[in-house]
Image (tube, rainbow, N blue to C red):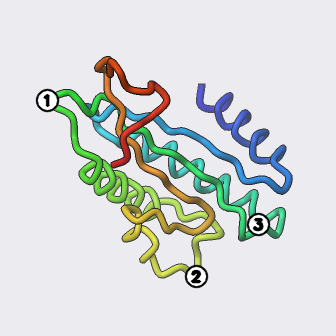
């Protein structure tokens, strides 16, 4: 339920005092990214609003984007996913720009691949469905 998710996210952002919030957004690398972009947009907006209300621009919310099923033949690679996410975010921003966006030139989205965005820091990892015998299961491959 979208309203329940929004309420939980608002609460999580409100409860973080001085510490930045860390989130994981898992997306299926074999599927379209539009819904993941909508969630990322919402998280970005909440992070910006939370930072503004706390007068805190130093502590960015960290969002780890886990591109799942990277081992499958039909999976998009991490760079393709990042480009598609950027395109979907551009479409969302063309329809509804949040108040904190005004004054930005839009060049921030060009750096989606380099993770330098206002209010959030992105980390990219690839995960797979395969069993990695002999590997530490807590290790994820960086994109």
Q: State the image quarter where residue 24 is shown.
A: top right
Q: Which residue is mark 2?
A: 103
Number of marks: 3
Q: Give residue 25's position: percent from left, percent from top.
A: 50, 39
The residue positioned 60% from the left and 63% from the top of the image is 98
Q: Position of residue 93 (x, y in %)?
A: 46, 62
Which is nearer the eye, 3 or 76?
76
Q: Which label sits on residue 73?
A: 1
State left or right for residue 20 relative to residue 32.
Answer: right
User: How far from the left and from the top, in percent, is residue 13?
Assistant: 75, 47
Q: As displayed, is residue 119 above or below residue 134?
A: below
* Mark closer to the chain start, 2 or 1: 1
Question: Which of the numbered marks, if any, corresponds to residue 8?
Answer: none
Q: Whole-percent x and y of residue 129?
A: 31, 21
Closer to the observer: label 3 or label 2? 3
Which residue is labeled 3 in the image?
Answer: 52
What residue occupies the far left of the structure in this picture?
73
Q: Nearer the viewer, residue 130 or 48?
A: 130
Quote the CA–CA distance across marks 3 and 1: 43 Å
Residue 47 against residue 35 in the figure, above or below: below
- Between discs 3 and 1, the one toward the N terminus: 3
Element carrying mark 2: loop
Picture quadrant where residue 57 is located = bottom right
Query: Circle 3: is it few (<14), some (14-19), or many (20+) Cα within 10 Å?
Result: few
Mark 3 secondary-structure assignment: helix
């Amino acid at each position: 339920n979208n309203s329940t998710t929004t309420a939980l996210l608002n609460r999580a952002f409100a409860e973080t005092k001085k510490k930045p919030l860390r989130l994981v957004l898992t997306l299926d690398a074999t599927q379209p990214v539009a819904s993941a972009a909508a969630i990322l947009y919402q998280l970005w907006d909440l992070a910006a609003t939370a930072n503004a209300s706390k007068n805190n621009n130093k502590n960015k919310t960290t969002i780890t984007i886990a591109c799942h099923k990277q081992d499958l033949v039909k999976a998009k690679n991490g760079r393709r996913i990042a480009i598609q996410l950027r395109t979907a975010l551009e479409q969302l921003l063309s329809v509804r720009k949040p108040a904190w966006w005004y004054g930005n030139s839009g060049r921030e989205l060009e750096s989606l691949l380099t993770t330098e965005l206002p209010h959030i820091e992105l980390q990219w990892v690839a995960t797979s469905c395969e069993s990695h015998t002999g590997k530490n299961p807590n290790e994820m491959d960086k994109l």
